[in-house]
Amino acid sequence: MSVEPWASPQDQAAAELSHSEHTDTPPSQDQEQRPDKLCLDSFWSEVENIQQGSGYADDCSRRDSKHSEEGEQEEQWLADAGLSTLISEDTETIDKTALLSTLTKTQAEAVKRRIETYTLRKRNKPPPRDVRDIFSSQVRMPVFVYGNVFCSAVTPEHQRGTPKDEYFITDVAYCEQAVILIKQAKLPQNNSQRRKEDGTLPRVICPKCRLGMTRIQDLSHADMKKVRQLALIDMTALCDLLELEVKRHKTGKRKNPESPLFGVPLATLLENDQKLKPSTSIPLLLQELLSFLEKKGIDSEGILRVPGSQSRIKLLQQNLEANFYSRHVRWDEVSPNDAAALLKKFIRELPAPLLTAEYLNNFSAVREITELKQKLHMLNLLILLLPEPNRNTLKALLEFLSKVVSKEKKNRMNLWAVATIMAPNLFLHKAVPSRLTEGGEKGQAEKAADVMRLLIRYQDLLWMIPNFLMSQVRRLNENSNRRYQLYDRRFKNLLRKIHTDSREKPEKNSEVSWCHSAALLLSLETLHTLMHGVVCMSLNRNGSVAYSDCALYEVGGNIGEHCLDPDTHLLDLYNSNPGGEWIIKRRPSGSRWL
């Protein structure tokens, strides 16, 4: 079974050196066990600058962001999860029935709790449907089997690596894995086997199933919407099990910003930028700042920590607001420290947090979780829940921060230093009250920086769609398609006539498509080689590359559109989705950060 390690190149090299010399701990990790005094002082200095420079205390006192009213949170939660019809009079909704049939036992219990809470808090309104009517049949936890490989929530003994390695299983729902871990923690013989948290980050190994890995950008928008609904249910069930009380906030109305670049809603800024550059997925200003810092500032000692000149930063901001879109900004005259300060200011002056007002407290609550696996589980689900502009912007930022850490020998900024500086800019926002500023305790700063550290180190892992969510999406699509077959005979005859007419007049298509019967005539080895060498098919005779961004897609059946992992076993894919087609086509153009 193929596995993929998730760690920085420096940690992987150190791990290999450690293994060859039979030592216990890589040297590079010893240096990052705990943040030093300079890191902690920088953290609270950054918090103080945020409070003073952006009117944080004043905005919080005005309560622009407020808790939802009684019952409103549950109602909004059910709407976001695609289950709002459970509290309405409509009992024949297709999406509701299909979605409920895909839930595991723990996920279904989380939905039940939300409906019961909504019922108690809304007694003055017409009574909703009884919970027992909604969940009339027992929901069974699915068992995921791919080929001859069985994946469980517990890592088998023969698959366990060194004590520094962690296995990240995605075939079983995260909430169901938490149930198993909670039961195991109660056993006395397992107390001594618990991994000691010493501040080091292990190498995380994610076993690949036979259907390969799926990235966020590999799915269609329709399927991603279903992924977000299912991820919300699993994340809520996980919070219930871990006893994390997280209340959602909603951001109040704010004045229109005077600046065209700073304080503008992220979606609005991106929409305006896409009129100039349709393929962009993050704001153009952020692209310029990151590109400049990568070229001129990434080697500067103390980058991100050393403050720039306030007068120069103000002039730079005014210059950008006046001349950015006309391309008259002289970047060669800009100080890297000023650009870094402006980058942080751009993030914290967004009218809504980059991590969103709805889920900012969930991100902050991750620091209260003790098990590393469960921290990564929660972060993975939260990344999936972010709106696309926020998620893409966060990914671009994290990739830049990872590059800063990779230049530690030159800029003297290790992972702890970067995490402690950036954590306040992401976890503090004037629109959402936070407990992070209550006192200057060392533990608070260290826990917040630890979450930021996980986001930077394991970002590639966190931008992956778990296999259990992919399986649930497939079953959701199958159940929806099965329900849609209950149409009357006249409509079926009309569809049959349209299908016959379309077969008589086939449309021209530049994409290469195979039906399964034709594809399976080729040997499995040939198709597997084709997936690895799909780029080679576009090589011209003179050696030039014509289409270097081609990929094999799975289209139709129980999926909308899915860009396949090169390690996908096609026979297993056919058995999983016999109604789909395989198409070779070019990937959509996008930002280089994605």
Image (spheres, helix red, strand yellow):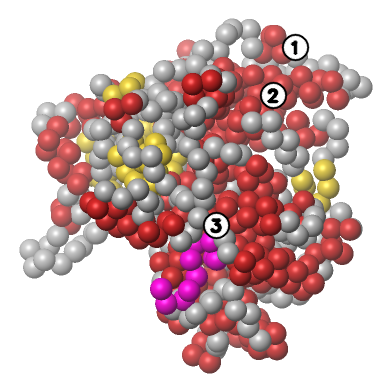
Q: Residue at x 16, y 38 (%)?
A: 527
User: Mark 2, residues whose alpha carbon is within 10 Å: few (<14), some, or many (≥20)?
Assistant: some
User: Mark 3, residues whose alpha carbon is within 10 Å: few (<14), some, or many (≥20)?
Assistant: some
Label 2 sits on what residue type? Answer: Thr
Above-or-below relation of 408 to 218: below
Residue interval drawn in magenta: 409-418
Residue at the far left in the pictured view: 541
The earlier-in-sequence mark between 2 and 1 is: 2
Residue 383 at what x, y percent from top left?
55, 46
- Which residue has dot 3 on it? 34
| Mark 2 → mark 1, Cα distance in angstroms | 13 Å
The earlier-in-sequence mark between 3 and 1 is: 3
Camera-near label (3 vs 1) is: 3
The label number, if any, that marks residue 130 in the structure image = 1
Choose top left, top right, bottom left or bottom right for residue 242. Answer: top right
Please state if 430 lies on the left or on the right of 552 as rendered: right
Residue 345 at what x, y percent from top left?
66, 72
Q: Residue at x 30, y 39 (%)?
A: 3
Toward the viewer: 397 or 510? 397
Camera-near label (2 vs 1) is: 1
Magenta stretch: helix, strand or loop mostly:
helix
Above-or-below relation of 424 to 49: above
| Mark 3 → mark 1, Cα distance in angstroms | 51 Å
- Which residue has dot 2 on it? 85
Please state if 91 lies on the left or on the right of 302 as rendered: right
| Mark 2 → mark 3, Cα distance in angstroms | 49 Å
